[in-house]
Image (cartoon, rainbow, N blue to C red):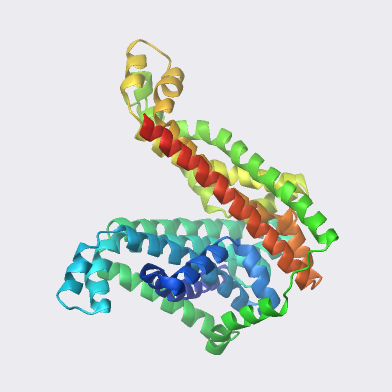
Amino acid sequence: MIVQLAFETLAIAGCAFAIALTLGLPAAVIVVRGGIVGKIVAFLATAVRAIPDLVLAIICVAALGLGPVAGVTALGINTGAVLAKLFAELLLAVRREPEEALRAIGASPLTSFLIGLVPEAWPGLVGFAAYALESIIRGSVIVGIVGAGGLGSAIVQSFNLANYHEFFMYIAWLVVIVILVDALSGWLRERAPAFAAVGVFCAIAAAGVAGIALSGNVSGSDLARALPRVVHFLADEMPPDFSAKVIATATDGIEVTIVVAIVGTFGGALLAVPLALLAAPRIALGWMRGTGYAPWSYVPMIISRFGLAIVRAIPPLALGLLALSIVGLGPKAGAVALALHTAGVLGKLFGESLEIAPLTEAESLVATGAPATAAALVGLVPGALNALLSHLAYRWEWNVRASTTLGMIGAGGIGQAIFNAQQLLFYHQLIAYVIFAVALVVAGDVVSQAFRARLHLRTVLR
């Protein structure tokens, strides 16, 4: 049973990955070519990217009904928009000389692109595709809430039935899958030859499509008609319902969502600091004490790194369901879930930043007999501060999206308004709440980008 659910999850992810590549690659090429069409495609990719995963899944359920088609379509469209942006930015950033040289000797635009530009961007293209695969695996549990099947649906069902033994068992399997996919992704990005990366990506996509098709619940025509049906649904539900009641509900929901994101971000950052100190080898293994590496220090470092990996691998929605069972319905559950997941992510990123920070000041403090804690906080942290703040800004951006999603499982906020409207079939209200949610996400992105730009300017001025 569990093995079958795991294969269903991988099939959903693989099929969504195929859709994402099918949409993302051509869209990126169109954006790179520019012109009016390129600008339109870039705008659409930006708009779709701003819609949180589960919000898009709710729209797909309203348009397509319950089942794997809605979940796969939502994951594929969302990740395809992300890949379109990442691939386009990468292709625009690499050296253009090889492509221009080929065009100068009469090569066709396609030949110039494939031979002159793609090899220059290849490592980044592989890295972004691997990142997309990781994101889709994690997202597969999200679409389980809308009945797509796999471990996500099993996790939600076991929680609703208060069967916590199965709940934790399903989460454990999901963690194992995510860790294995992360390892595969790292190998593809860093060490795999080009043909191996292409082969793995094609095999995953083909296996996902075949797995969904062989399940007997979905046909190829269902998948082919999914995107046009979603577009038709959105057209039919226009204009959105911007009545006074809807605006008041959305305003209250946005306030709750922002509070959850703030508490989750900064609460998680506070938890991440001690975990990062334990996970950074130069601190954990004894160097900061001036005594050299101590063998016994490996134990807390390994435990810390293992704990961070597990917390990062558990999707926030699963953490949210667990928090609901402990603190009850409402924003507290969302804040607890985000704080835990943020601690896992930032603990790793903070630890890596401390590993590459300048050592001079910390070494001087250690040499004069300063305690390890003082040497780390006073001598090491300031040198890594810009990187730490940049990670915090990225996480804030991510948590604004996640807090919207968590509202759909009972954590309050604009997400809960979206879920309630979908359940009551109030689709004009649903579209209005989605627009408010997208505006909130875009505003969060703008704040984050402005903060990172200020950090970069401060670094340059130094």
Q: Is residue 381 left or right of residue 446?
A: left
| Image point (37%, 11%), residue name | 369
Q: Could you say where residue 367 lies in the image, as x and y percent from the top left?
A: 32, 13
Whether residue 181 is visible to the viewer of this picture, yes or no, is: yes
Quarter of image, res 61: bottom right
Q: In this view, does 197 lie above or below 296?
A: below
Q: Choose between 231 and 335: the one closer to the eye.
A: 231
Q: Could you say where residue 410 lies in the image, as x and y percent from the top left?
A: 75, 55
Q: Is residue 63 above or below residue 80?
A: below
Task: Say which quadrant the C terminus sits in.
Answer: top left
Q: Residue furthest top?
A: 368
Q: Is residue 126 left or right of residue 54?
A: left
| Image point (55%, 49%), residue name | 446
Q: Which residue lies furthest to the front in this view?
A: 36
Quarter of image, res 375: top left
Q: Is residue 160 left or right of residue 268?
A: right
Q: Choose between 402 and 44: the one closer to the eye.
A: 44
| Image point (52%, 66%), residue name | 43
Q: Could you say where residue 16 lies in the image, as x and y percent from the top left?
A: 50, 72
| Image point (37%, 25%), residue name | 286
Q: Could you say where residue 178 lies in the image, as x and y percent from the top left?
A: 48, 58
Task: Say which quadrant the N terminus sits in.
Answer: bottom right
